[in-house]
Amino acid sequence: MYKMARRLNPHTQIMHDKQNYADGTVNPPVQHASTLRAPDYLSYIGKKEWAGKHYGRHGIQTHRALEDAVACLEQAYGVVLAASGLQAVVLSLISFLQAGDKILMSDNVYPPVKLFAEKFLPKLNISTVYFNPLADETMLAELYDANVKLIYMESPGSATFECHNIEAIVGFAKQHNIISVIDNSWGAGVYLKPLELGIDISVISATKYICGHSDILLGTVSAKSRAHYQQIADTARFNGFYVAPDEAYLGLRGLRTMPLRLAQHQIQAETLMAWLRQQPEVTFIASPTAQDWFGHEHFKRDFSGASGLFGFYLNENDDVMLAEFFDNVTLFALGASWGGYESLMTPMNIKRSASPHLQQFSGQSLVRVHAGLEQVDDLIASLNDGFTALRNSKA
């Protein structure tokens, strides 16, 4: 292992850890292999230590390098890779649940996670109960029974941006011996350290900020304890989960520069939000950084910074009018995902949310924005084009 003279900040260490590859490079080789040749018989049967994992599906040097770097970032015992963010979530759930169990799931989670919980888990006789993302111990206690084995949260929610009271949720989970899992994609392991706050499992859609270039799909599952890590690793192996070495390499490459990119995304987002607040059509900025948004006090306590994803509410819900706006904001691609170098803008459907604090926005439209790395003046000019088109269409 590459030895450091002193303890480094994890954001520095992920750029340097284990850079002792045999060919002298600072990056690991991209190894394509299904078969791994054992050095001898005793190694193959497990009676001697062998650096290999017996079969390519279990990962090789490229995968190990990314796992180690993410473990350093998240301060985890170990990390398991997944082929997408959603697969990472699925892995974090099925590793700890069995027939008859129940999940407490925050109402603000990534919509495909809700679909998995509602369409697939019932086939395994696993049920889901949603809780208000602003819940405290008392609210959670009202939903609890002995079948609850896992609590799943996302802070902030990537659609509606509430921040949980993580301290309260962790306290409740520990009191009842419940596994706690969080989607940490927004904070990306840089601005939120959930394992240090007492959460058991942290999931990141590495497709987003870790990779940073909108060109691959990847997920990570970080475990605080050895026992939880082993359970996740076994589940991934038993179910044939696999990440291609090229994706692992690109994820590692993106990880090296992620803290610097995130800092710029934050600056871009704050500049755009300040401009949007001045527009009469904008009724509310949905961002954990906004003092009047839900859970802001929890954001201030638990996060060290903000990423580039936020939302705003428009006092318009007519599709013809919305088309005038979206189709004229040309620098913001109309597309799903976020976390890449490019700016995105997406209409969000929050009708499925049962959270009472969102009912005040009935009849309005939630627009989700990912502030990319373009020149911010150009982004503001493009937004202005959209608002001008919207106003002209009403004239």
Image (tube, helix red, strand yellow):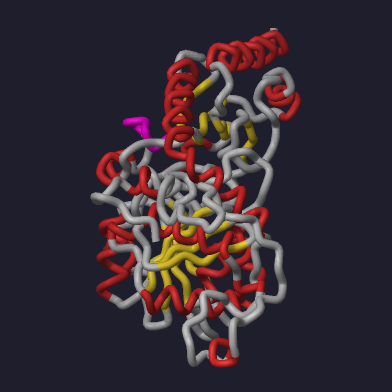
- Residue drawn where x is 55% and y is 25% of the image: 373
| Quadrant holding the N terminus | bottom left
Q: Is residue 253 left or right of residue 392?
A: left
Expressed as whole percent of the image width and height from the top left, the position of residue 8 reads 28, 47
Residue lying at the far front of the rendered structure: 23
**Relative to 162, is 309 above or below?**
above
Q: Is residue 249 visible?
A: yes
Residue 82 lies left or right of residue 12; in this view the side is: right
Query: Which sits in the foreground, 166 or 126?
Result: 166
- Nearer to us in this view, 256 or 185: 256
Residue 344 placement, left or right of 291: right
Left/right placement of residue 280 relative to residue 179 reads right
Q: Residue at x 53, y 42 (%)?
A: 209
Residues shaded magenta: 286-292
Check the image and report above or below for 45 versus 329: below
Residue 291 counted in the magenta span: yes
Percent coordinates x, y for residue 59 in the rendering: 60, 69
